[in-house]
Amino acid sequence: MVPSGKRAAVSSENRRQQPQDERSQRDSTEEALKSVLLEDLPIKRLSHKNITIEGYSRAAFQTYWRIPEFRLGFDLGGQPWAFMGTPSWFVSHTHIDHVVALPAYVSRRRMMKMEPPTIYLPEQAVPLVEKLLHVVGRLDRGRLPCQLVPAAPGQEFELSRELVVTTVPTQHTVPSLGFIVWERRKKLKPEFHGLPGEKIRDLRLSGVEVTNEIRLPRVAYLGDTRVDVLDEYPDLYRAEVLIMEVTFLSPHHRGEKIRKFGHVHIDDLVARRDRFQNELIIASHFSIRYTPRLIEKLARKAIPDMLGGRLLLWL
Ligand SMILES: [Zn+2]
Ligand SMILES: [Zn+2]
């Protein structure tokens, strides 16, 4: 929550610039806030093709990601000020470090006069999150408008003409989901290859379906989970970018306990090293038992070539 002093800064800014240009009003409000919010949550960024992956994740601490170009994010374990403009969020599960910022996110969007967001989350969590919002709303004496969408494994959510998100069941200690973001593209059917452009246009105008829809798995996101989901849903191995948790790296933290608590060990990646077709595999959500230096060391020891440079440690 933004303290009341900061709220005052927002509303006086709002009064000064009346609504003729909502965007420039928002920009200048954000500028004003930047001078107030000296310290925000850390964000690491990476560009890949035409998308940017932004976020930060450490186990038991905080997890938040977004792809601004797709206008969607994953997990709400923190909410950097810059992330507020992203309108759709997919929550993998309701452990505190993945969900605690949900009410603050909803409230900020309302305060900034943005559309109520849409938040997809495991269906079992929806009634309790509704209660949570109700209680926080009463404590804050403010409305928390948002759409909570119950999600189950195997579902498909259409975000736009180009983007579809599907769900996979992950294995953790509370109900949990992973997500795959697919980009839909039209591709000319093979029988029309080589035809001149006007001919194709004429066919299309005469009502012939000249294209097929193809789907590209652009980004896959796995919150906390046992590694088995990768083998059960091989699309995850095909996503251009795979963002996943690798909570444990030390040889001392191995075996049944990790499986029981629903987490991934770097050795799980070693065992599957030939299956990853991803262009980029982002390993994150490292246990806070490890320092960044130790994480580097243990990862490079386990996978010296870092999967041909495709494995990236999000530190
Ligand atoms: Zn976690
Ligand atoms: Zn968890």
Image: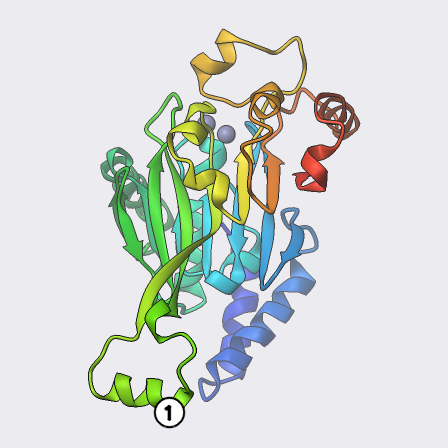
The structure's colour scheme is rainbow
Q: Position of residue 13 (x, y in %)?
A: 55, 75
Is 251 above or below relative to 268?
above
Neighbour tally class for label 1: few under 14, some 14-19, many 20 plus, Cα within 10 Å: few
Work out whether residue 224 can be spotted.
yes
Residue 81's spot in the image, x, y percent?
Answer: 56, 57
Residue 5 seen in this snapshot = no
User: Which amino acid, by three-letter code, is at mark 1?
Assistant: Glu
Q: Which of 74 and 41 is in front in this view?
A: 74
Quadrant including the C terminus? top right
Q: Position of residue 107 (x, y in %)?
A: 41, 55
Give the residue pinned by disc 1.
198
The residue located at (38%, 49%) in the rendering is 140
Which residue lies at the image location 66% right of the left edge and 63% below the top edge? 34
Judge left or right: residue 226 versus residue 13.
left
Q: Is mark 1 on a helix, strand or loop?
A: helix
- Left or right of 32? Residue 120 is left
Q: Locate residue 159, reporting x and y percent.
A: 34, 61
